[in-house]
Image (cartoon, helix red, strand yellow):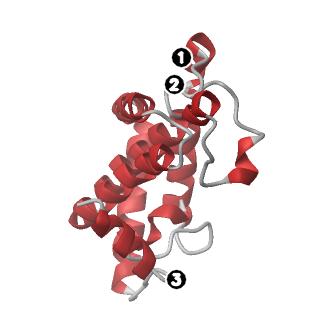
Amino acid sequence: TEHFSCALAMPISAEATPHLNMLLRRVRMDASRATDKAKEHYRRMRPFMETGDAICTPKEQSGLKADAYPSGHSSIGWACALVLTEAAPDRANAVLARGLAYGQSRVVCGVHWKSDVEAGRIIGAATVSRLHADPVFVAQVAEARKEVAAARAAGAKSPLDCSAEAGALALDR
């Protein structure tokens, strides 16, 4: 959830924004689970497994399995971005750019193929679409929207140093 704090320009945490935090936790779980069956079916090798190249996060490497397709990170990142645009429509461009970068970083780091990320985004969007049929989800989004407005009215700002993220996202353009 904190991955979107800079794009949203405010803190996201259980303490600062409990409704938004809970909503994003729910979306994260649903978007992650939505990739499980496809991962089990395809068991696609990750790029570094085929090429032998180094990855950006070597400590993560030993825990990664041959289940690259579709990307769970991309599904989660895109689903969270879509929900955040509902809670803060005025930040949609920044939030969607961050959501795209969330998945793209997996390609840059050599742990996913581009098609893994694209499929993950589709699954993330489908997950959010399906969630809109749930009245509890719709109510959670409405509460999150109110919470975002109240936090902004109180002058809340992201607690993170967002300059590095802004620079990295600018490179993608």
Q: Nearer the viewer, residue 65 or 119?
A: 65
Residue at x 60%, y 54% (from the top left corner): 56
- State the SS at label 1: helix
Look at the picture and state if 116 lies above or below 58: above
Residue 163, percent from left and from top:
41, 81
Residue 143 locus on image (x, y percent)? 42, 58
The answer for how far apart the CA atoms under marks 3 and 1 are is 37 Å
Disc sitting over residue 38 in the figure: 1
Q: Amino acid at mark 3?
A: Pro
How far across and how far down the image is residue 158, in percent? Answer: 46, 80
Q: Of callouts 3 and 2, which one flags the residue occurring earlier in the amino acid sequence?
A: 2
Q: Label 3 vs label 2: CA separation? A: 34 Å
Q: At label 1, which amino acid type do we have?
A: Ala
- Residue 69, label in figure: 2
51 relative position to 114: left or right: right
Q: For the residue carrying disc 1, how many other residues have a C-alpha within 10 Å: few (<14), some (14-19), or many (20+)?
A: some
Give the number of the mark in front: 3 or 1.
1
Instruction: Tell me which residue sits at (61%, 48%) in the image.
Output: 55
Q: Which residue is mark 3?
A: 159
**Residue that lies at the very extreme toward the top in this rendered image:** 41
Using a 10 Å C-alpha cutoff, classify the residue at mark 3 as few (fewer than 14 neighbours), some (14 to 19) or many (20 or more). Answer: few
Residue type at tag 2: Tyr
Residue 149 falls in which quadrant of the image? bottom left
Find residue 131 and name its label: none
Residue 72 on image: x %, y %? 54, 35
Among numbered discs 3 and 1, the one appearing first in the sequence: 1
Please tell me which residue is depicted at 44% across the width and 77% down the height of the picture: 164
Q: Mark 2, residues whose alpha carbon is within 10 Å: few (<14), some, or many (≥20)?
A: many
Number of callouts in the render? 3
Q: Are marks 2 and 1 in contact (CB under 8 Å)?
A: yes
Compared to residue 115, the image places residue 1 above or below, namely: below
